Amino acid sequence: MTTLNDVLKFIQTEPDWGPNYSNIIVASLKARRKSDALKIKSSLSVGSKVGVAGRTQYWLGTVTKVMKTRCAVTNSNNGLSYSVPMSIIDVKEAA
């Protein structure tokens, strides 16, 4: 099994990775986040019931607008609308 130390040692000794390793890692993380957002976006539409996992609480809401990387979600508890990243949305019921 490959450990983190093995990966770091490879990155440091490999001539192609040398100074660009942080850029490569950041690019791969962004690509992963984008693919995850596209999966969620394909199951979302206006009127979908969703759960939002915030920093301190989890709340339910309804999608009012689907944007490129975020969704406008109306909170079921207080009626306020929030712009929420797709990475923290759980689809409960598709519209």
Image (cartoon, helix red, strand yellow):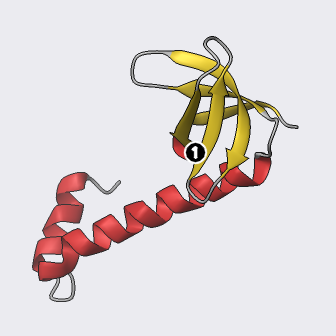
- Number of numbered discs: 1
21 shown above or below 34 = below
Residue 28: x and y in percent read: 40, 67
Q: Residue furthest right?
A: 95
Q: Residue furthest top?
A: 77
Which type of secondary structure does the marked residue at label 1 adopt? Answer: helix
40 shown above or below 25 = above
The residue shown at (59%, 23%) is: 80
Task: Between residue 29 and residue 95, name the one nearer to us.
Answer: 95
The quarter of the displayed image where residue 22 is located: bottom left
The residue shown at (54%, 39%) is: 84
Q: Residue furthest front?
A: 80
The quarter of the displayed image where residue 15 is located: bottom left
Amino acid type of the residue that numbered disc 1 sits on in the rendered structure: Met
The residue shown at (63%, 55%) is: 67
54 shown above or below 72 = above
Horizontally, residue 4 falls left or right of residue 93, namely left
The quarter of the displayed image where residue 39 is located: bottom right
Horizontally, residue 94 falls left or right of residue 26, namely right
Which residue, given by chain and number where applicable, does mark 1 sit on?
86
Q: Residue furthest bottom?
A: 16
